[in-house]
């Protein structure tokens, strides 16, 4: 049984075996079978697939055929049945699954860590939102010119390499600002940021980066 990822085109190989009319019946691979293929998706009535089949190598791999599934063939989650008939061949029955995700979608780094999808990756550009308030109050502080520093730990703070802008443009963010961080600002598993502006409280926050 094979797992197919939903909505992904596959080239699938299958075997046709000689029927009782030829040599080595029910054992030998059958060449020239010109298979007719039907599929059933998740228990529904079978339908014929018109995708072109190819006999892989009749001289060295007799009876092995391939077919490329169309997106419409693998667009339904659940069980997937293949039924192939051909000239001089026993019927071929196969049972597979169409699944939302494959284990092979997981990738491992050379240090044994799992690669994951994240908006915050080490050594990559990123976006972070933050809020500024007026000094001594909890009122929003729009229209500021904000400068940023970042730290990777004991080495202390350094100026950010990215840019800072007010959300929506000057005086339109209601006190919200956006840091467009450069790769140099994310070169650590954990990064601390200090945002400062004249007439406003500092905003301090930490971000954990995926390796």
Image: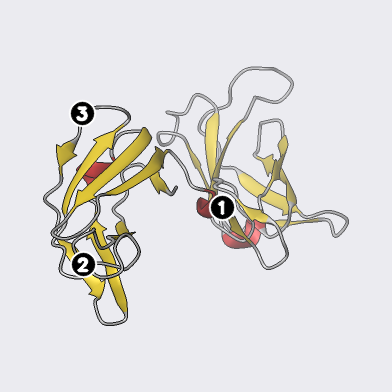
Marks 2 and 3, how far apart at CA: 32 Å
Marks 3 and 1, how far apart at CA: 34 Å
* 3 vs 1, front mark: 3
Looking at the rendered structure, which numbered label has been put on residue 45?
3
Q: Name the residue rendered at 65%, 24% in the picture.
A: 134
Task: Tell me the quarter of the image containing the C terminus.
Answer: bottom right
Of the pair 164 and 70, the residue shown nearer to us: 70
Q: Quadrant of residue 5?
A: top left
x, y percentage for residue 133? 64, 25
Is there CB contact under 8 Å for labels 2 and 3? no
Q: Secondary structure at mark 3?
A: loop
Looking at the rendered structure, which numbered label has been put on residue 106?
1
Mark yes or no: residue 24 visible.
Answer: yes
Answer above or below: position of 173 versus 35: above
Q: Secondary structure at mark 2?
A: loop
Query: Mark 1 or mark 3, which is nearer the start of the sequence?
Result: 3
Is there CB contact under 8 Å for labels 2 and 1? no
Q: For mark 2, what is the residue?
A: 22
Mark yes or no: residue 180 visible.
Answer: no
């Amino acid at each position: 049984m094979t797992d197919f990822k939903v909505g992904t085109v596959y080239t699938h190989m299958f075997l046709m075996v000689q029927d009782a009319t030829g040599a080595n019946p029910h054992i030998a691979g059958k060449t020239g079978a010109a298979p007719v293929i039907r599929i059933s998706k998740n228990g529904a009535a079978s339908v014929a697939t018109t995708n072109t089949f190819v006999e892989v190598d009749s001289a060295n791999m007799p009876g092995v055929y391939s077919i490329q599934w169309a997106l419409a063939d693998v667009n339904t989650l659940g069980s997937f049945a293949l039924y192939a008939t051909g000239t001089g061949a026993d019927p071929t029955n196969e049972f597979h699954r169409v699944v939302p995700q494959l284990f092979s979608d997981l990738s491992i780094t050379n240090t044994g860590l799992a690669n994951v999808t994240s908006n915050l990756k080490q050594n990559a550009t990123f976006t972070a939102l933050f809020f500024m308030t007026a000094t001594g109050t909890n009122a929003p502080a729009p229209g500021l010119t904000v400068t940023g520093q970042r730290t990777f730990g004991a080495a202390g703070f350094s100026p950010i390499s990215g840019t800072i802008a007010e959300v929506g443009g000057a005086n339109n963010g209601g006190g919200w600002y956006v840091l467009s961080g450069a790769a140099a600002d994310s070169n650590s598993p954990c990064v601390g940021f200090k945002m400062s502006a004249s007439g406003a409280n500092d905003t301090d926050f930490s971000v954990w980066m995926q390796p």
